[in-house]
Amino acid sequence: MIELLEILWERGRDAASPAPVSSSQLRVLYILERDEGINLRNLGRLLGAAPSSVSRLCDRLQAVGFVERTTSQTSRRELELWLTPSGRRFLAELRARREVALRSAIAAMPPAARTALTEGLAGFRTAVRGTTDLGADRPDDRQARSA
């Protein structure tokens, strides 16, 4: 099952832009979308990655025009990271393509299987929220949509 979802996700990602990003880079984009203006140190903490790795990830994303670094207003020693309009467009196109791929696959399922999938995903969502901090303190459902 996981492999099928990965294939579907990859198709959507590869078709979304002439500059596809790695899964690590995509994770950075999702974090920046959620936590605009985050600094490299906090991004590294969220990724569980070394500062040099985070910096290289951001270098690549900046090179393709998806991320912008600015000096922090509170500390000149810190850089803040922001999605550019191109980065936002990339994520929007990626989500749209993934949604089309998912809708197509779901439409091909028999009605009983779609019902079972809906019930199973509702249970899965409840379990995930009960065991992780995904979606915590978020009034909207953006986390689930971007997963």
Image: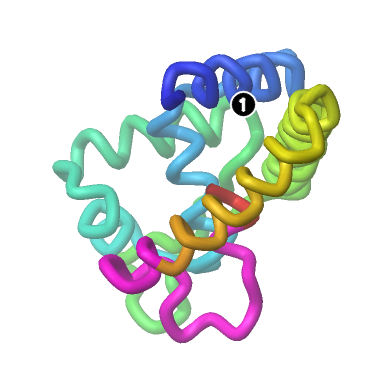
Looking at the picture, how far across and down is residue 41, in whole percent? 24, 60
- Quadrant position of residue 45: bottom left
Depth check, front residue: 88 or 123: 123
Residue that sits furthest to the left in the current view? 50
Depth check, front residue: 68 or 15: 15
Looking at the image, residue 90 sits to the left or right of residue 37; the answer is right
Q: Residues within 10 Å of mark 1 (few under 14, many from 20)?
A: some
- The structure residue drawn at horizontal position 47% and vertical position 72%, both measured from the top left corner, is 135
Which residue type does callout 1 highlight?
A: Val
Looking at the picture, how far across and down is residue 3, in whole percent? 44, 17
- The structure residue drawn at horizontal position 43% and vertical position 72%, both measured from the top left corner, is 72
Quarter occupied by the N terminus: top left
- The structure residue drawn at horizontal position 32% and vertical position 73%, both measured from the top left corner, is 130
Above or below 53: residue 43: below
Looking at the image, residue 40 sits to the left or right of residue 48; the answer is right
Looking at the picture, how far across and down is residue 8, in whole percent? 62, 20
Q: Secondary structure at mark 1?
A: loop
- Quadrant position of residue 141: bottom right
Looking at the picture, how far across and down is residue 108, in whole percent? 82, 23
Which residue does the numbered mark 1 point to in the structure image?
64
Depth check, front residue: 26 or 134: 134
- Quadrant position of residue 117: top right
- The structure residue drawn at horizontal position 50% and vertical position 36%, both measured from the top left corner, is 26
Magenta-drawn segment = 127-144
What is the image's colouring? Answer: rainbow
Looking at the image, residue 2 sits to the left or right of residue 15; the answer is left
Residue 109 part of the magenta-drawn span: no
Looking at the image, residue 60 sits to the left or right of residue 105; the answer is left
Residue 131 part of the magenta-drawn span: yes
